[in-house]
Image: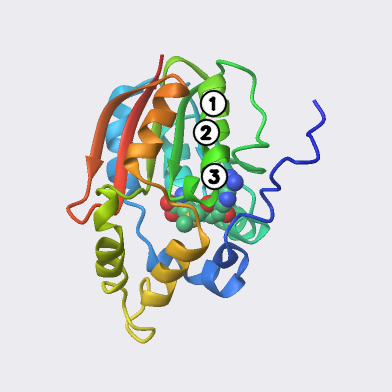
C-alpha cells in the first residue's frame, strides 16, 4: 500500500546521535545492552532454535548478534545507515548469519503472525506517541498469537507533579565528557528532543494494541521500564 503523504518519515526522526559517526563508533563503549542475560531469559521461553526473532532498532546489534548464535533466523532492523554500517562490519567479522534490514517500526514489512519474538531496546522513544501506538499495532500484527515482545526503554514512571524534579535528578546523574558514558548533555537532549513518555500513557497503548503485560520492571528513579509482553 502506498503511504499517505502525512506519514512520518523515520529516516528524519531517528535521533541526531544515531547518524553521528563519532557517536556510533563509541556506542558499544558507552552502552552495555546486557544482551547475554536477556538472551538467557528469552531462550527459556523460546527454546526452539527455529524461532523467528526480530530486533527492531537494533543499533550496533549487541542483542541481535548474540541472538543469531542462539536462534537460526534473526533479523536486525534499523533505519540508521550509520548504525547498520557498523553492524554489517561486526556481523562480517563474526561470520554471523544475522539478517540486516534498513527500515524502522513503521516500514519493516513481515507477513502477519510470522514472528515468535520481537526485541526492542531503547528505540521506541524515537517515535511520538501517536506513532508509538501504530508501531505497537504493527508489531502485534507480525507476531504469532502468544508471541513475545520484549520492550525496554526510557519510560517515565512517576506522577505528573514530580516530573520536573525527577527529570532534573536524572540529568544530574550524567557524566562529564572526560569521564565517558552518557553525559548530562546527552540526557538533556533525550528529554528535550526525543519522545520518551509516561508509563501511564504507554501501558494503555500496549493493551489497546492487544498485548498482555506479563511483567513490568521499573528502576528506582522511575526512568527506565522493561516489559515482557505477550500477543493476545
Ligand atoms: C539507543 S540506540 C539502541 C540500540 C540497541 N537497541 C541497544 O539497545 O543498544 C536507538 C536505536 O533506535 C534506532 N531508531 C530510531 N528510530 C527508529 C525507528 N523509527 N524504528 C526503528 N529503530 C529506530 C536508532 O537508529 C538507533 O540505532
Give the residue at x 56% y 22%: 142
87 relative to 225 in the view: left or right: right
| Secondary element type, mark 3 | loop
Residue 20 visible in image: yes
Residue highlighted by disc 3: 96
Mark 1–mark 2 Cα distance, whole angstroms, equals: 6 Å
Q: Position of residue 4 (x, y in %)?
A: 79, 35
Q: Is residue 174 above or below residue 127?
A: below
Q: Position of residue 22 (x, y in %)?
A: 56, 75
Q: Is residue 188 above or below residue 106?
A: below
Give the residue at x 44% y 37%: 119
Circle 2 packing at 10 Å, graded few (<14), some (14-19), many (20+), is some
Q: Of the numbered discs in the image, which one, if any, rests on residue 137?
A: 1
Depth check: give the residue in front, 95 or 146: 146
Q: Position of residue 145 (x, y in %)?
A: 45, 12
Queried on whether the Cβ of the residue with tag 1 lies below 8 angstroms from ligand 1, the answer reads no
Residue highlighted by disc 2: 133
Sequence-first tag of 1 and 3: 3
Q: Quadrant of the C terminus?
A: top left
| Secondary element type, mark 2 | helix
Mark whose residue sits in front, 1 or 2: 2
Mark 1–mark 3 Cα distance, whole angstroms, equals: 30 Å
Q: Mark 1 touching mark 2, by CB under 8 A?
A: yes
121 relative to 127 in the view: left or right: left
Circle 1 packing at 10 Å, graded few (<14), some (14-19), many (20+), is some
Q: Position of residue 125 (x, y in %)?
A: 48, 49
Circle 3 packing at 10 Å, graded few (<14), some (14-19), many (20+), is some
Q: Mark 1 touching mark 3, by CB under 8 A?
A: no
Mark 2–mark 3 Cα distance, whole angstroms, equals: 33 Å
Q: Is residue 170 above or below residue 149?
A: below
Sequence-first tag of 2 and 3: 3
159 relative to 121 in the view: left or right: left
Amino acid at each position: 500500500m502506498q503511504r499517505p503523504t502525512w506519514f512520518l518519515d523515520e529516516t528524519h526522526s531517528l535521533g541526531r546521535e544515531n547518524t553521528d559517526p563519532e557517536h556510533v563508533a563509541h556506542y558499544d563503549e558507552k552502552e552495555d545492552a546486557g544482551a547475554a542475560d536477556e538472551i538467557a531469559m528469552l531462550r527459556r521461553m523460546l527454546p526452539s532454535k527455529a524461532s523467528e526473532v526480530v530486533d527492531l532498532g537494533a543499533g550496533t546489534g549487541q542483542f541481535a548478534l548474540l541472538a543469531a548464535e542462539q536462534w537460526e533466523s534473526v533479523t536486525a532492523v534499523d533505519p540508521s545507515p550509520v548504525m547498520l554500517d557498523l553492524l554489517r562490519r561486526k556481523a562480517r567479522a563474526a561470520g554471523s548469519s544475522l539478517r540486516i534490514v534498513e527500515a524502522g517500526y513503521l516500514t519493516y514489512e513481515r507477513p502477519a503472525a510470522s514472528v515468535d519474538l520481537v526485541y526492542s531496546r531503547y528505540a521506541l522513544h524515537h517515535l511520538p506517541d501517536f506513532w508509538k501506538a501504530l508501531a505497537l499495532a504493527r508489531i502485534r500484527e507480525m507476531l504469532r498469537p502468544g508471541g513475545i515482545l520484549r520492550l525496554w526503554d526510557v519510560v517515565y514512571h512517576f506522577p505528573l507533579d514530580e516530573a520536573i524534579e525527577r527529570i532534573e535528578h536524572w540529568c544530574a546523574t550524567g557524566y562529564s565528557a572526560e569521564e565517558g558514558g552518557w553525559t548530562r548533555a546527552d540526557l538533556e537532549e533525550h528529554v528535550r528532543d526525543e519522545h520518551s513518555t509516561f508509563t501511564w500513557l504507554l501501558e494503555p497503548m500496549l493493551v489497546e494494541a492487544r498485548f498482555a503485560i506479563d511483567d513490568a520492571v521499573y528502576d528506582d528513579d522511575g526512568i527506565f521500564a522493561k516489559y515482557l509482553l505477550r500477543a493476545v
